[in-house]
Image (tube, rainbow, N blue to C red):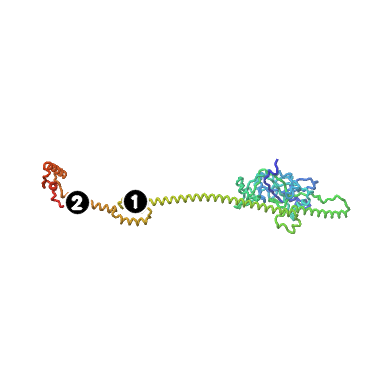
Amino acid sequence: MRDMKDFKYKTSFSSLVKPLVSEEKDKYLALAAIDRIGEFVPDIDEKNIDLLPVAFNAYVVNRANKNGDVIDAETALSISRSFINKPINIEHNRDKVIGVVLTAGYSEFGTDRPLSEEEVKDMESPFNVTLGAVLWRVVNSGLADLVENASDPTSEDYLKISASWELGFSQYQLVITSGDKNIQNAERVTEEEKITELEENLKSFGGTGVLEDGRHIFRQVLGDVLPLGIGLTETPAADVKGILVKKDKNNFEGKSASKSSPDEESGEKNKSSQNIGENVKKVYNDSERKLMKINSINDITDESLKVLSASAISDYIREELKNASEKFVSQKTAVEDQLGETQEKHDALSKDHGEMKQELEKVQADLETLHKEKVAREKEEAFNQRMSHMDEEYALSDEDRKVIASDIEEMDDESFKTYSGKMQVLLKDKNKSAVAEKAALAAEAKASEETKVSEVVEPEASETTEEVVEEILEAEETENVEVPASTVTAEHTVQDRYANAFGLDQFDF
């Protein structure tokens, strides 16, 4: 068995009451009203003069109400019969029940032409759910008169009374339109994540009912929906107006049980009529005080204070305080959520900043290392080029290289240029070009000298110099054996022999 607590959400739809007045009031109004929604008025036995039959459009299907809520045809058909036997009260005060719903049907939006269930089951355009009910005169006769007056265009109370109904539900989806209240061409949002993202824009959640891009957003009631009853009010939320009232010719409050003489009867009648009128007026005013609702501070005027009850003012103040409190809580929650999101973004940015800082420091360290390696590499390359230049330019010993390497190791290009100029002077004797030139000259001179010698000393064609020398040496050994050591002639000395062999007298020493 379902319990009221099972319904997570509540909403209300309203309509203005359209009275079906008696012929005593205005037969033309009565006929016009009967022609439109008269068939929805419950058929009550004329003996039940304490009952006031009424009919009214409870709400418009496929069209959003002022609260930003909407019901489609499928849901409307599934709950329309559930209105039957539900109570009618004043301003949704369940302690002040004044009637009951007896019939339910459908009518065309704008014209109130009755429609069948077959006609509306697949309808996407707006149509009305129309209810028939009875009000109990004995409970509040003044309210019954007020409802009747609300049907008279010449009355100050014309279309003043509204029928507002409540329902409970647990599911909904979002409906987005370009600005139209009709939902037949609307975009439906069914994803939970998307609904959570957009629902703060709903009027029922404290939003404006309008998205940032200018489109309108509504809440479509779905699932297990239960009508909770009808309340008579002055502030309808739906685009429906009027309540139809059927009143019997007999005046229930005007009857008198006592008999009198014609004069007395006349006087009593006048007195009775006067008392009845005063009583009705009093009840009417009391009912008006109960029904009248302050919508803004401007509604409290000297004139309205004559009929306003203290409860209406207190209700207005309480409602305003409630709205202000809800608005404050909503704004506070929004600010807290925004602060939370901002803090999360700040933490995320701080974390990203820290990581980026570490990455940057690492990159800077790597760049510095690469720069040092590049400088060292360039320095080494410059050193090698300079040493190669010195080796190519000069004939250096190892000691020379050590000294030069020590000198040029830390030099820049300009300093090395200056140093190189000095070395050209200091190492000119070791300049490879100069040394090679000297060597070439020496070789040339030596070759020239050897040429001269070969031209002067030419051995006989039959024997070489070697052979001559060998012969001389052999002859000398022979002579040394044969001749005593003490006997040496000038003719046979070695010098003489070489002179004879080579013709030394031909040479100039």
Q: Which sits in the foreground, 360 or 64? A: 360
Say which element carries label 2: helix
Q: Secondary structure at mark 1?
A: helix
Residue toward you, 267 or 467: 467
As drawn, the residue found furthest toward the top would be 1
Q: Is residue 459 left or right of residue 4?
A: left
- Which residue extends farthest right? 261
Name which residue type carries label 2. Glu
* Residue toward you, 473 or 50: 473
When asked about the image quadrant of residue 407, the answer is bottom left
Report whether residue 264 is seen.
yes
Name the spot of residue 340 as percent of width and height, x first. Answer: 60, 50
Q: CA distance from mark 2 to mark 1?
A: 41 Å
Q: Residue 153: image x %, image y %?
A: 74, 54
From the top left corner, tell me how far across and down residue 487 is, in percent: 11, 45
Q: Which residue is mark 1?
A: 402
Question: Which amino acid type is marked by label 1?
Answer: Lys
Q: How many marks?
A: 2
Q: Residue 198 in the image: state x and y as whole percent.
A: 61, 49
Instruction: Report the quarter where the N terminus lies.
Output: top right
Q: Can the viewer see residue 208 in this picture? A: no
Give the residue pinned by disc 2.
Answer: 449
User: Residue placed at 45% from the left, 51% from the top?
Assistant: 368
Left or right: residue 236 versus residue 345 is right
Decide: few, some or many residues near mark 1? Use Cα within 10 Å; few <14, some 14-19, many ≥20: few
First-in-chain label (2 vs 1):
1
